[in-house]
Image (spheres, helix red, strand yellow):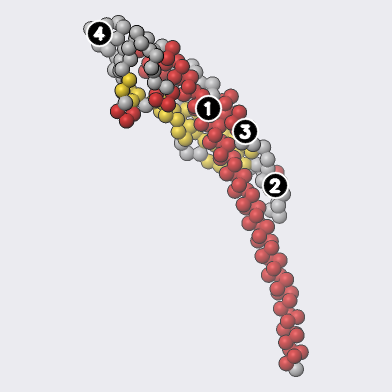
Amino acid sequence: MTSARRFGDAGQAFPIYITVVGGLLFLAFVYLAVGQAAANRNGAQTAADAAALAAALDTRDKLTDEWVENVLDPTKWQDIFNGEVEVFGGCERANQLAAQNDATVTGCAGPGGFPPGYEVTVRTTESVGDSLVPGTEDTYSEASATAVIDRLCEFELPGEDAGDDMLPELTCEDGISWPLDPDNLDDLPGPEDLFDVHLADGQANDE
């Protein structure tokens, strides 16, 4: 009697065991799908960050070139340091960096106001992939990022009694000063001395 009851209990437990194992396997596949989606979103955000930074760095370099070209005309410096000159063309670099990170730029704009910069939106070129979760094979991740360009230097225009050939001194971050001699312009600050480029908040999602 006891032996028969033991085998009967085992027979009843076996379907429960199969159900539990099947449920655990299903949860494992669901978690795998969630992990795939998270990895896809992370990839999209990485691509958006890289694209926005590339666009801003490209414009930072162009702003520096513009300043060097007009270094003898300090009246133009403020517009250059404020990004109020027509040198915004960094979206091409954004496209290149997004492609290198398996994404496509779906939006790129230089936000108005100060500080200048770029807001870039990208979409992954690969979907989340096949899984037990319906629709993931047609789900792509989108992300956006904004990179801004901050000036690092200030200056004061010479007074009216100053000579026409006198240039302002640049006072930059960390107390660094750049006295400028119009007769010796071999040692000028570089892009990283004049401007800082950094990311603002970004956001990723699936569609």
Tell me the tag on residue 162.
4
| Apparent side of residue 72 relative to residue 118 in the rendered image (left or right) | left
Three-letter residue code for mark 1? Ala
Q: Are marks 2 and 4 in contact (CB under 8 Å)?
A: no
Q: Are marks 2 and 3 in contact (CB under 8 Å)?
A: no
**Mark closer to the chain start, 4 or 3:** 3
Q: Which residue lies under the disc numbered 2? A: 129
Who's the residue at 68% across and 40% down the image?
Answer: 126
Q: Is residue 57 visible?
A: yes
Q: Are marks 4 and 1 in contact (CB under 8 Å)?
A: no
SS assignment at label 3 = helix
**Mark closer to the chain start, 1 or 2:** 1
Q: Which residue lies under the disc numbered 3? A: 100
Q: Which residue lies under the disc numbered 1? A: 55
Q: Are marks 1 and 2 in contact (CB under 8 Å)?
A: no
Mark 2 → mark 3, Cα distance in angstroms: 20 Å
Q: Is residue 76 visible?
A: no
Q: Position of residue 156 (x, y in %)?
A: 29, 17
- Which label sits in the foreground, 1 or 3? 3
SS assignment at label 2 = loop
27 w.r.t. 189: above or below: below
Residue lying at the far top in this picture: please name it: 164
